[in-house]
Amino acid sequence: QVQLEESGGGLVQTGGSLRLSCTASGHTFGNYVIGWFPQAPGKEREFVAAMTWPGGAAYYADSVKGRFTFSRDNDKNTVYLQMNNLKPEDTAVYYCNAGEQIGNGLGSWGQGTQVTVSS
């Protein structure tokens, strides 16, 4: 089973940018789908972005379209989520999820990385 490690979170002001990384170990991404699911305090994890591997098709929630961009580095077995024009409502722990299917209870999950956007 693939192990996932996220990094790149931090504290930024409204309008700032961050780039999150999710690196796979123990297994390649193979023919997986990889997704990002932020979880704000007191809320459920929600989908914001996903990418198919190796095809590379990307999908975004309406709330982040035009602000977030999913990319990947095949050689490093790593995917990235570039987050621009961040808003306070983007504040959450961002989890990377990968598998043949993704979502709550599916695939492998990382430990998460905290993103805090100050107003």
Image (cartoon, rainbow, N blue to C red):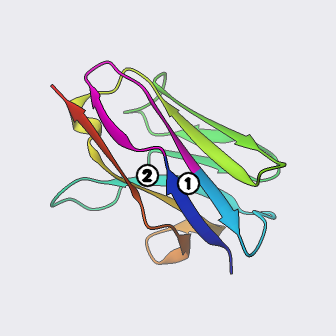
Q: What amino acid is found at the position of numbered circle 2 in the picture?
A: Phe
- Front position in the image: 43 or 29: 29
Quadrant hosting residue 98: bottom right
- How many numbered badges does the structure rendering display? 2
Would residue 19 be counted in the magenta stretch?
yes
State the image quarter where residue 31 is shown: bottom right
At horizontal 76% and vertical 55% (from top left) the residue drawn is: 77
Q: Say whether marks 2 and 1 touch (CB < 8 Å).
A: yes
Relative to residue 115, is residue 66 depicted above or below? above
Dot 1 amino acid type:
Gly
How far apart are the alpha carbons under marks 2 and 1? 7 Å
- Out of 38 and 4, give the one closest to the viewer: 4
Judging from the image, what secondary structure is the residue with disc 2 in? loop
Report the span colored magenta: 8-21
Q: Which sits earlier in the primary sequence, circle 2 or circle 1?
A: 1
State the residue position of label 1: 35
Helix, strand or loop at mark 1: strand
In which quadrant is the N terminus drawn? Answer: bottom right
Relative side of 77 to 97, left or right: right
